[in-house]
Image (spheres, helix red, strand yellow):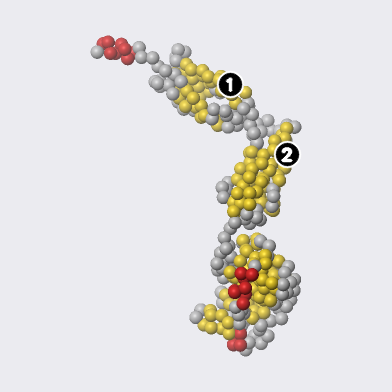
Amino acid sequence: MTLCLALMACKKVNVDFTYSPTEPRAGQSVQFSNLSSAGEEWEWSFGDGTTSSLKIPSHVYKRPGTYRVLLKVDKKNSLTKTAEITVYDTVPTFVCADSVFTIFRNYTFEANVYNPFNYTIEYEWDFPDTIVSTTGNTITCYFTEARQAEVTLRVTMNNETTVITKTFDVQNSATNALLIRTAAGDYRQRIFGERAESALADASAAPLLDAEQDTIQTYNGWEFRLSDLKTVFPELEGFHIANRKIYFRANGLWVANIDGANIVQIDERLCSAMVLDTRFDNRIYWANKDGVWYMPFVGSDNNKFVTIPTLLNELEGVTKLALDNEVK
């Protein structure tokens, strides 16, 4: 037993460590791994004037360069390990919190630039589609086409310019569509919340547009016909009902309570077609000589509205509107 204790006392303590990443950059956290075979106290010196007493520390180097890292175990000079670590200059980049990109949705890209000496930085973004806003180091934008799209950032700091280009796979997005009939043909325009793609000629829209519109609707188990409603609204040309409101065409576009009270004009121009979206956006779409418009449903009891109608497109000669709620 005495011999075993003596052998154990003479057992050599191995002091060692590694770090990750192996080629760190200024401003990047470096994780040190303590591989020592024994010990209870730790003294780290990172070579830049900073120290740590943690067994497994991490450290951030503020400047590029080569640093000599020392690990001492149990305060014994005989139990030390030193190694050099090379820290490289940082490279500006930009990131986005999202990983999947679809058309007509807002995305914000943010530049990451390590600037410990507070140099003046100039940012120049090159975005292929529509920019919503930019604040220097960030840009908010959206893509209008499904494709491989390149976003480029030029960062100028301390008279040096770095160009970063990243490619993003922009995918199509399922949504509902407004179908539009004009004298020139039928169109489909997909709606994405507050945005829409261009109206595109689409012969497949014909079946829904061929159906009779504006003249008959079942609401809360009751069937409403154009001929019946003309007793209350003599100039009625077409109607839709939603949320106890009736929207109708009669030398313009109007809204009233379902009992005929509180009639309010939405648009004084001749309304040639209209349709209500009660499934997705709770909007009314209508057409006049200037194009196709939309606005949210009217919500107040007196039918006063504060939302300004929004122009969707400038198609002329629109005669019918329909919604394709089967997402494409």
Secondary structure, mark 2, is strand
Q: Residue drawn 62% across and 47% down?
A: 168
Q: Is residue 10 left or right of residue 128?
A: left
Q: Residue drawn 57% across and 50% down?
A: 100
Which residue occupies the foreground of this view, 102 or 28?
A: 102
Number of numbered callouts drawn = 2
Residue 170 is at least partly visible in this image: yes
The label number, if any, that marks residue 12 in the structure image:
none
Pointer 1 local density, CA inside 10 Å: few below 14, some 14–19, many at least 20? some
Q: Residue drawn 56% across and 47% down?
A: 99
Q: Quadrant of residue 328?
A: bottom right
Q: Quadrant of residue 295?
A: bottom right
Give the percent coordinates (x, y) of residue 90. 63, 31
Q: Residue drawn 62% across and 27% down?
A: 88
Secondary structure, mark 1, is strand
Q: Quadrant of residue 96?
A: top right
Which residue occupies the foreground of this view, 281 or 21?
A: 21
Q: Is residue 39 above or below residue 245?
A: above
The label number, if any, that marks residue 67 in the structure image:
1
Give the percent coordinates (x, y) of residue 12. 38, 14
User: Label 2 is placed on what type of residue?
Assistant: Glu
Q: Which residue is mark 2?
A: 122
Which residue occupies the foreground of this view, 43 or 5?
A: 5
